[in-house]
Image (tube, rainbow, N blue to C red):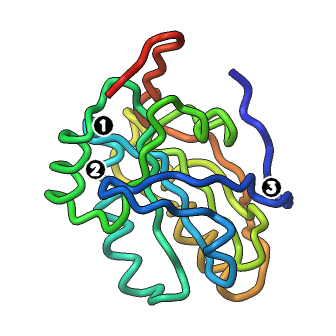
Amino acid sequence: MDTLNLIGRPAPDFGLSSLDGVVYRLTDAHGKVVVLNFWSSECPWTERADQALSEWMREWDSSVAWWSIASNANETIQQLTQSAARRKVPLVLHDPFQEIADLYSAHTTPHLYVVDATGIVRYQGALDDVTFRQRTPTRFFLKLAVKAVLAGEQPDQPQTPPYGCAIVRFKGELCC
């Protein structure tokens, strides 16, 4: 599956239900910078991203919204709810049939997107430069991208390869 380059384009709009049933539409967040985080209750790379995002959100204040999107076909609502509570993830939206993951061409958890306050995608890719072989980050791609967008600038590196666990897709089968 190829990654769709959304940089500089309007973010595809969507409506998804949170784990408690409230519907969120991306267009409702215009006026804020939105970090879209394709998320998993099982992936250790996602858990690491949750820790970093929790810390960075304190710096970014209310001008940034953090929306996690759970797209794995094999994860139940109960699993998602328990992991979100344990990790203190403020908002998890459920994408049980990977429709939004497909719309954004998200491949991994985490796969991160930064949408500016006008609804334009300014970054897509990895949290940082950590990989299986490089365990200590030297560059925090997402944090740098959000910092640039908040300053009204373009990120120096608007696209990086996402790194994490594959999004689980079961075509033709129902989940949940």
Marked residue nearer the N-terminal end (3 or 2): 3
User: Foreground residue, 58 or 140?
Assistant: 58
Marked residue nearer the N-terminal end (3 or 1): 3
Residue, disc 2: 47
Q: Is residue 112 above or below residue 43?
A: below
Kindly indicate the quadrant of the structure image that contains residue 114. bottom right
Which residue is pictured at 26% across the width and 33% down the height?
76
The amino acid pointed to by label 1 is Cys
- Name the spot of residue 6 as percent of width and height, x first: 79, 50
**Is 85 on the left-hand or right-hand side of 110?**
left
Task: Say which mark, if any, is on residue 43.
Answer: 1
Q: Quadrant of the C terminus?
A: top left
Q: Is residue 41 visible?
A: yes
Task: Say which mark, if any, is on residue 7.
Answer: 3
Q: Secondary structure at mark 3?
A: loop
Which residue is pictured at 62% across the width and 76% down the height?
33
**Is 88 on the left-hand or right-hand side of 164?**
left
